[in-house]
Structure formats: C-alpha cells, structure tokens
Image (spheres, helix red, strand yellow):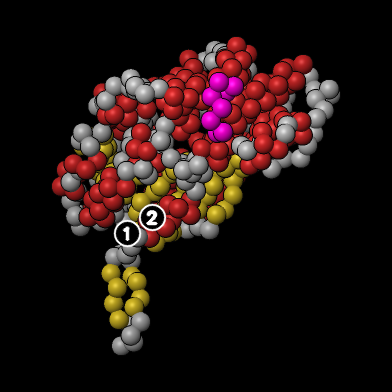
Amino acid sequence: MDARVPTSLSIDETIRLAASRIVGCSDSDRVGILSLLNVPFDPSISGLSIEDQKNVELAEYLLSSADRVSSRQYDEAISLVDLCDCLSSPKGNAVQRVVHYFARGLRERVENETSSKRDDGDEKSYLGDVLRLPSPSIVLSAQERFPYYQMQQLAAVQAMLESAASARRIHGIDLKIKSGLHWIAFMQALESRPADAPRVEILKVTAMCTGAVEPVRATGEWLTGFAKSKGLNFCFKIVRVEDVLDVRGEMFGVDQGREAVMVYSEHAFVAMIGRPDRMETLMRVVRGLNPQLMVVTETEANNNSPQFSARFVDTLFHYGAVFDSVDACMGADDESRTFMEGGIMGRMISNIVAREGEERVIRGVKLDVWRAFFRRFEMVERRLGPVAWQQARLVHETAPNGEFCTVERDGKAMVIGWKGTPLVSVSTWKFFRSARLVNGSKHLRIEFE
C-alpha cells in the first residue's frame, strides 16, 4: 500500500477529544491523570466519521485505564486494558496502533506492581533488548520517508561542513551510528565544495558501539563502498565496548593537531539520563578528543517525570505525533513500519510506561536540560547557520508531507516537530579552547581555535 495523507482526526486531536468527554462525564475523584490534559468539555462526536468516533471511544478506554493504574485500582484498570486489547491492533489504523502499544505498557506496569516475582531475565539482557538497533537497511528505508528526519540530517551535515570548510583531514566520531545516511550526505557535500577549497585528503569515521557489532559493520561497508565510488580516501573504524564506562579516548585513534575532529551524536545520550555515570564518562572522553564541533540531535520530549501520571500524558502526546507521522509517510503493510512501531517504538513506550528506577532507560528531556548538562563540561552553544534554515524550509515546502512539519528556533538551535508537537532538536557545541587576559584587564575572554 502506498503512503497516504490521513484526512481524519490526528491522534493528538483524538486524545484531546476523548479526554474532554471523560472529564465532563466523570466524578471529580476519577480524573487524576485526565486533569493534566487541560482540555475543555466537548461531549459531541456525532459530526465525526464512524472511524473517528470509534477512535475517540478507544482513546477514552485507554485514558480511563491509565487513570485507574495511576490511582492503583488495578482490577478496573485491567478490565479496561482488556477492552483496549480487543479494539486495538498493531495492524490497524494509527489510533488503534498507538493504543495497542500503550495498553501493553499499562498491562506490564500492573503486572510489575502486583506480582511479587519478576521474570524479566537479568537487567543487562533487558536493557539490551530495549536499546537493540534494527538492521541499517530498515533504518535507512524508514529515515528516507520522514521529512523531519531530512531536516535534522541536513542541519547537522551543514554544521559539520561549515566547521570543516578548510580542513584537509577530517575525523568524524559517531557516538551511536545507525544507517550512516548523514555521512553519505556529508561525502556528497564534500564533493560539492568550491573549487578553491582545500582538497580532502582523507575522511575517517569512527563509530562507538556498545551492542551488536554486525549492524555497525554493515553500515561501515556501505559507507566504504560509497566513498570508493566517489574517489574519496575513506577509513571506517569501530570502537566496541561492553559498557560506556569502559570507553577511553585513545581507542578512537585521533591524530591531534593534524585532523579536524567532529563528534556526531544522534540520540546517543537519551538512554543514559538515568545513568549519569555513563554520561559523564562519555563527556570526559569527548572533551579529551578536543573536537572542533559537536552536533547533538536528541528527542525533544518531556517523559522523564518521576510521577507516572505526568509521564504517561507527555509520552502519549509525543508518541501519538510520531505514530501520526508514520501513518502519513509509510504504507500500512510496510515492513519497515512494522519494525519501527513494534520493534522500536513499542519497546520504548513499554519501558517509559511500565518501568521505574534504573530499568527505565528511555527518558526524553527538553533542550534546556541538555544545555544545562553540556555547560557543566565548559561547552558553549553555537548558532546554526542560515543555510541550515534555508534547507529546512526547502524540505518543508517541497518534500512529501513536509507541510506537516514545524521548524522553530529555540535560541541557537533548531526544534523540528509534527503538526505542532516538537519531536527532535538539533544543536551544535564547542568546548572552550583557552582563556587569557586581554589588554591587561582582569576579565577573561574566551577564544576558540
């Protein structure tokens, strides 16, 4: 089936309408989680299509079940989850799909809270399953369909290209490589550099890996083949460690002073928010590599609240927008869509909804939280250049489904969303290189290389 543009209610609109109907019809002691949605009472769905009416009712059951879980009324919660299971499907419309995975997360949470014996296997095995990456071909097939991914990729590549404008030897450090599509775009951009720009003698990409090495190796082979077709001297290396705590700077083989080092981080830090020792270890290593630029792409979400109610609501709206975009950009029976929704997003939803403590590894936060973290390591944010914004606008105007994307400035960074819901941020950073007295004054001026 070809990808289609949905003409019915979006998932966001469906959730809000469902919440308004429950709030208007419920007793005050039944709206704990629903009060967080801040919606007016609107009981009418008679003007909607039959499918939209069924979707609103299904969303009502999901919200009601989450409300019962929040108030620890587990018997009622499970009855409503059972109803959600009957009416939803991983192969249905977008609302049915997202309800299916959230209902699964709620059921798992109830089981975790009511069972004295957990049968998860060891923690390391569980975390590895949540963070498992698909094959590069599936990731690539999915990425090419989404206009907001094109926007984030173009912004990141343009920032690296501008930073390496005069470099002959370039070394990219990729903290969590997937398809490697951004490096393909970077090679193409290098090929298009002005005639008076220095010739690139070598491009090195070193990929850090803490999981299965085969998908990373496959990505490296693809990048190597592409570079060869362009006549580009290219070297790909994998740094494989069992745990981020084991990473050391010397593993990356950086030739200090002879190559322009750039760090690319795409969703590399989000799974370490609940494990700050890993984050700080990685940042100390990155700082030691002395990169001239670090590009950070992270999920723009707020699903790290310790309170279940707030976390559930924020997660529902965030993933609702993601599922809505998948429905617009991919066919119903697309193999990549099936893996994305069930193999990636479904596991993430369950982790956020059902788990607590160190087992809750998916913890999206907003850009300001990342800013505070990076500044602790004496990093300064750099402004994305005008070309990056021009390219984002071009995707918005010309790419299939680009009109549904939103692109906003947040200080010096770019925040990209779907139908008004922020999904991802792109920011660029540099470390302080040196500080010295200027004109004998007592004030320090920060200088960059």
Residue 407 in the image, given as x and y percentages of width and height: 59, 45
Q: Is residue 261 visible?
A: no
Q: Main secondary structure of the magenta part?
A: helix
User: Residue at 18% of width from left, 41% of height from top?
Assistant: 246
User: Residue at 35% of width from left, 30% of height from top?
Assistant: 131
Q: Is residue 358 visible?
A: yes
Quadrant holding the C terminus: bottom left
Residue type (three-letter) at the residue carrying disc 1: Phe
Residue, disc 1 = 377
Residue 439 in the image, given as x and y percentages of width and height: 33, 86
Mark 1 and 2 residues: CB-CB less than 8 Å, in contact? yes
Quadrant holding the N terminus: top right
- Relative to 225, is 13 on the left or the right? right
- Relative to 40, is 366 on the left or the right? left
- Relative to 223, is 413 on the left or the right? right
Mark 2, Cα crowd under 10 Å, few <14 / some 14-19 / many 20+, is some
The label shown at residue 373 is 2
Residue type (three-letter) at the residue carrying disc 2: Phe
Q: Depth check: give the residue in front, 68 or 265.
A: 68
Residue 71 in the image, given as x and y percentages of width and height: 56, 33
Q: Is residue 432 magenta?
A: no
